[in-house]
Image (cartoon, helix red, strand yellow):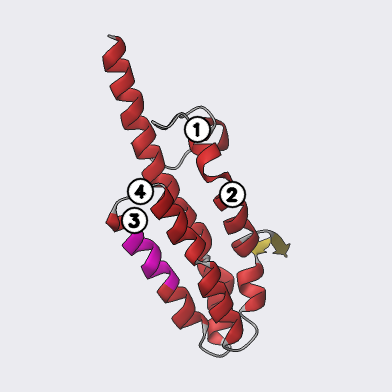
Amino acid sequence: MPTHITREEAETLYLPDGQTVAEAIAGFDRFSDLMDTRFRIAGVPFGLDSLLGLVPVAGDAITGVAGLYALGTAARHRLPITAHIHIIWNLVVDVLLGSVPLAGDVFDFFFRSHRKNFRVVEKHLVKRARRHHKRMARARA
């Protein structure tokens, strides 16, 4: 069963705490969009991560620290350790490869670690919501 869902589905899929998946990660969705895909040049999306990455060392350090928002979101929703490891891996790759002069700037433009981390969190919350839905359906039967 695929875990990537449309915004409409996310608004109707409820977690055990009563929130929809969309409500639970709305702020993180806006943040990851701003960091990775908010702007476009010639149809290619990019965000603040790509722009800040142009500033040697400090830019990648700032976006790396900003990326900890994903880890906080995963912790707040008590996601499994595998999700935390996946998020940390994406952040480390982004910071290390993004800090390479010139090649790192191109890498930052396409890697989009914040959107990747959004999808990690979304995937785990969708799975949780679907399990909750099945439990509720069995309880009603």
Could you tell me how far apart the alpha carbons at marks 3 and 4 are, in whole angstroms? 10 Å
Could you tell me how far apart the alpha carbons at marks 1 and 2 are, in whole angstroms? 13 Å
Q: Of 65 and 87, which appears nearest the observer? A: 65
Check disc 1 and give the amino acid type.
Thr
Q: Position of residue 95 (x, y in %)?
A: 48, 78
Give the SS element for disc 3: helix
Q: Position of residue 76 (x, y in %)?
A: 43, 50
What residue lies at 50% left-to-right and 32% top-to-bottom? Answer: 20
Could you tell me how far apart the alpha carbons at marks 4 and 2 are, in whole angstroms? 17 Å
Check disc 4 and give the amino acid type.
Arg
Give the SS element for disc 1: loop
Q: Which residue is mark 3?
A: 83
What residue lies at 38% left-to-right and 33% top-to-bottom? Answer: 129
Location of the N terminus by quadrant is top left
Could you tell me how far apart the alpha carbons at marks 1 and 3 are, in whole angstroms? 20 Å
Q: Is residue 132 left or right of residue 69?
A: left
- The relative height of residue 115 versus residue 14 in the rendered view (above or below) is below
Which residues lie in the magenta part?
83-91
Mark number, residue 78: 4
Give the mark nearer the N terminus: 1 vs 4. 1
Check disc 3 and give the amino acid type.
Ala
Q: Nearer the viewer, mark 4 or mark 2?
A: 4
Q: Which residue is mark 2?
A: 27
Is label 2 in contact with label 3 (beta carbons under 8 Å)? no
Quarter-of-image position of residue 91: bottom left
Location of the C terminus by quadrant is top left
Quarter-of-image position of residue 75: bottom left
Q: Which residue is mark 1?
A: 20
Give the mark nearer the N terminus: 4 vs 2. 2
Give the mark nearer the N terminus: 2 vs 3. 2
